[in-house]
């Protein structure tokens, strides 16, 4: 059985990992939301994502892509 990739991972941790890996500019391209493109911060992004499930889903999808890339890179 596959483990849930979100189990025990806070939204803040997801954002921090994505920002470290992609940077705000690329995140704003991948997930076109204002809080990533205009004066981005973890705090403002968390506030927005907690209120907008559709945006949170896009960020979670990007996180799954990131985890797949990370797993692929570790096999090389």
Image (cartoon, grey):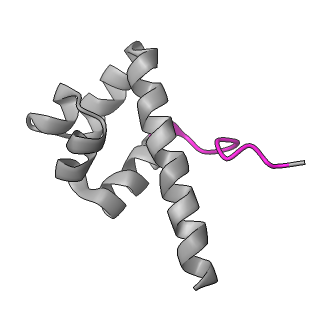
Q: Which image quadrant: the C terminus?
A: bottom right
Location of residue 58 in the rendering, given as x and y in whole percent from the top left corner: 43, 31
Q: Is 23 left or right of 51, judged from the image as shown?
A: left
Instruction: Report the residue that reaches farthest toward the top.
Output: 51
Instruction: Report the residue that reaches farthest toward the bottom.
Output: 76
Instruction: Report the residue that reaches farthest toward the left.
Output: 38
Give the residue at x 29% y 32%: 45
Give the residue at x 23% y 32%: 32
Give the residue at x 31% y 21%: 48
Secondary structure predominantly adopted by residues drawn in magenta: loop
Q: Is 46 left or right of 6, judged from the image as shown?
A: left
Residue 64 covered by magenta stretch: no
**Numbered disc total:** 0
Please tell me in which quadrant of the rendered image residue 46 appears: top left
Q: Is residue 64 above or below residue 34?
A: below
Q: Which of 67 and 44 lies nearest the eye of the viewer?
A: 67
Q: Is 41 left or right of 69, judged from the image as shown?
A: left
Location of residue 47 in the rendering, given as x and y in whole percent from the top left corner: 33, 23
Instruction: Report the residue that reaches farthest toward the right.
Output: 1
Q: Which of 3 and 45 lies nearest the eye of the viewer?
A: 3
Q: Is residue 49 above or below residue 39?
A: above
Location of residue 73 in the rendering, given as x and y in whole percent from the top left corner: 53, 76
Q: Is 72 left or right of 46, judged from the image as shown?
A: right
Location of residue 72 in the rendering, given as x and y in whole percent from the top left corner: 58, 71
Please tell me in which quadrant of the rendered image residue 9 appears: top right
Q: Which residues are magenta?
A: 2-11
Give the residue at x 82% y 49%: 2
């Amino acid at each position: 059985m596959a483990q849930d990739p979100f189990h025990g991972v806070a939204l803040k941790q997801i954002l921090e990992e994505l920002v470290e890996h992609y940077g705000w500019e690329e995140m704003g391209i991948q997930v076109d939301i204002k809080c990533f493109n205009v004066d981005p911060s973890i705090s403002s992004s968390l506030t927005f994502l907690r209120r907008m499930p559709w945006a949170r889903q896009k960020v979670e999808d990007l996180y799954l892509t990131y985890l797949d890339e990370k797993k692929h890179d570790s096999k090389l």
